[in-house]
Amino acid sequence: MAHADEAAIFNKDEEKVDWHDKALWFVRQKRDKSAHNVKGWETLRNLASAIKANVMSNLDNYLIQFEENAQKNGITVHWAVDADEHNKIVHSILQQTNVKKVVKSKSMLTEECHLNPYLEAHGIEVVDTDLGERIVQLAKEPPSHIVLPAIHKTKEEVDVLFQKHLGTKPSHGDPQYLTNEARKHLRDKFLKADAAITGVNFAIANTGGIVVCTNEGNADMGAHLAKVHIACMGMEKLIPEEKHLGIFLRLLARSATGQPITTYSSHFNKPASGTEMHIIIVDNGRTEQLSREDFRASLHCIRCGACMNTCPIYRRSGGHSYKATIPGPIGSILSPGKDLTKHSDLPFASTLCGSCSDVCPVKINIHEQLYKWRQIITKNVPQPVVKKTILKMAGRVLANTKLYDFAGKSARFMLKYAPRWVVYSKLNTWGKARDLPEIKDGNFDQWYKKRQRHE
Amino acid sequence: MSRTSILNAVKKNKPELLPLPEINLNVFSEDIDLVKTFIENVQFVGGRAILLDSIKDIDAEIKNLYPHAVKMVSCIKESSLGSISISKNTEPHELETIDLAIVKGELAVAENGAVWIAENNFTIRVLPFITNDLVLVVNKEDIHLHMHSAYESISKRDRTFGLFISGPSKTADIEQCLVIGAQGAISLTVFII
Ligand code: SF4
C-alpha cells in the first residue's frame, strides 16, 4: 500500500490524528525554545555538519582507528556487511556465552536488521526495555517514531495492553501508575538477563569508546547487570575525537525533545572486570549510500527525530504509514537508497516546505534530497497517470512566467469568488479537512515590487 | 572477510578528504552566574540542587530529605550514613534493594544541569542507576559553563566507564506525560559545596 493510502487509514480517527499532530508540534516548540537558549546554536550546527562531512570523507581510517583503540581496551569488535550477518554475529556471541535471556535498549539499527524475530526464532527471549519500545513490542508493532516509539498509542490503549501482558489493574490510562508497573516488570527482566544489547549514539575514533544516551536509564541497567554487553552500531556513528561530543551532545537532546541533555550520557570505554563487551559495526547499505554524492549527507543523521516532529506530513500521517524502519523526512531519503521500487512513494510524502532542513542539528539538506529522489524516481519508476499529468502541467506552468502569473491570479480569483463547494469538492483532496487561507489582494510578486518601490 | 570488504567499499565510495573544522570556543562564552544557572537547570530536568555551606552538613540534610532511607551506600568519606559497604567484588545484583547512594561528582555543567561521575567514584557501575534515590556532591569551583569545557577537563582521565547525569530517570512514553522515575534512580539531589 502506498504512503497516501496508509495515511488515509491513520486519518480515520480524527481525534487521534489531531492529538498526534499537536503533541509533536509541541515537541517541536520545546526544541525551538531550548535551541534559542544556546549561545552559538548555529555555530554548533555548522560545526556538527562539517565534522560529519569530514568523517564521511575519512571513514575507513576512522573505523580502523576506532577498532584499534577499542581492542586495546579489551572490547571485541565485529564487522557485518548486512543485516543477516549482524544477526548471526549477535546470535553466535549469545550462543558462546550460553545466553537465553536478553534485555535490549533502544537501537534503530537492530530494528532495521529485524534482530528480535531472528533471536526469538532461535529460542532466545528479547525484552525491549525502553518504555515506549516495550509498549510497541507488547502490541507486536514496530516503533512509529525513532525517539518516541509509542507516540501513536493512546494511554487507554497502553492500559489495556498492560492489563493483558503485565496483569495491571484498569486505570483509565494513568501514566504514573502504568510507568510504575512497567518499572517493576522491567526491573525483574534486568535482574534475570544474561546479556544486554544496546545501540550506540556516538563511537569515538580517538578513544575507541562509545556513548549511549537514554532518559530512562534502561541501557545502563541492562549493560551493568548482565555478563555480556553487545553494542550494535551503524558505521556512520563515528566521530573523530572525544571533544566533539561537546558539540553533538549539546545538539542531540535539545533537537529531540527540548531537554538540555538526556538524563544519562554513558561513556563505555572498557568492559567491567568479569564481563564481556562486543561492538558490531554494520554496513547494511551505508557504503552504497556513501557513494551517492547527492544523498551522502543523509549519513550525517544523529537520529534526533526533529525532522519528524516538524514535518506537516509526518504529524498527520503517523510513522507507520511510511512502512520503513526510519519514518519521516530522513527515512524518506534513506529508504529509497535501500529499495527504490518499494519506497518510491516516500520522497513524495512531503510538501518540500524545508522545515526538516531548518531544524536538523547536523544541517542535512533533507528537502533538497527528497526533491532529487523525486527526479530519479519519475525517470525510473512507473508513475500513476494522474500524478504524471499534473506534474507535467505544473512543470510547464512553472517554467513559463506568463503562465505562472496567470495561474496564480486565477487561483486567487477562484479562492476568492468560487463557491465553497468547488474548492472543497471531492476532486480537491487538499481541501479535505482544511480551511483555505483568506485571500489578500495582491500576490507575493506584487507585494515585493511594491515594497521595493517604497525603499 | 567482511571487515576488508567494508573498508574497501568505503575507500572506493568516500568523497575527497574534507578538513575537520576549527572550533573557536569564544563563540560560546558567556558571563553568567554558573552556580545559579546550574541550580536552575537541575530543577528544570526534574532534580534538586542545594547549596551547602559546609560538607559537614550533608548527613543532616540527607536525613531530612530522605527520612525513610535505610539501606544506604556512601561513596564519600565525609558522610557516615552508609549502612552497606561495597567493594570491587560486590555482585551488582545485590544492590537491587539499595535505597540511597551518595556519589562524588567530579564536575558539573551549568548549561544542562549535568554532573560527571566516573567509575572510580562509585565502584560498581550499576549503583547510580539501581539505587532508588541518588545524591551527588560537587564542588562549587567544579561547575563549568558548557560541555566543551567539561570535556576538556575530563580529557586526561583513565577511561573505563563514566557518565553525565542530568536529573532523575524519566519517561514521557505514555501520551507524552512526563513521569519521573523510569528504570533508573527515581530522584536526584545534587549538593553543591
Ligand atoms: S535528519 Fe536531522 S533532524 Fe532528522 S533525525 Fe536525523 S539528525 Fe535529526
Image: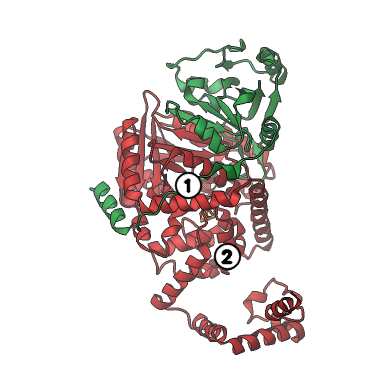
Residue pointed to by mark 2: A354
Q: Position of residue B120 (x, y in %)?
A: 47, 21
Q: Quadrant of residue B26?
A: top right
Residue pointed to by mark 1: B22
The local secondary structure at tag 2 comes to loop
Q: Position of residue A33 (x, y in %)?
A: 68, 49
Q: Which chain is green?
A: B
Mark 2 C-beta closer than 8 Å to ligand 1:
no
Q: Nearer the viewer, residue A302 or A19?
A: A302
Shade of chain A as shown in the rendered figure:
red
- Against A255, residue A129 (above or below) is above
Q: Position of residue B72 (x, y in %)?
A: 59, 16
Q: Residue furthest top?
A: B80
Tell me the subunit letter for badge 1. Answer: B
Q: Amino acid at mark 2?
A: Gly
As drawn, is B94 to the left or to the right of A78?
A: right
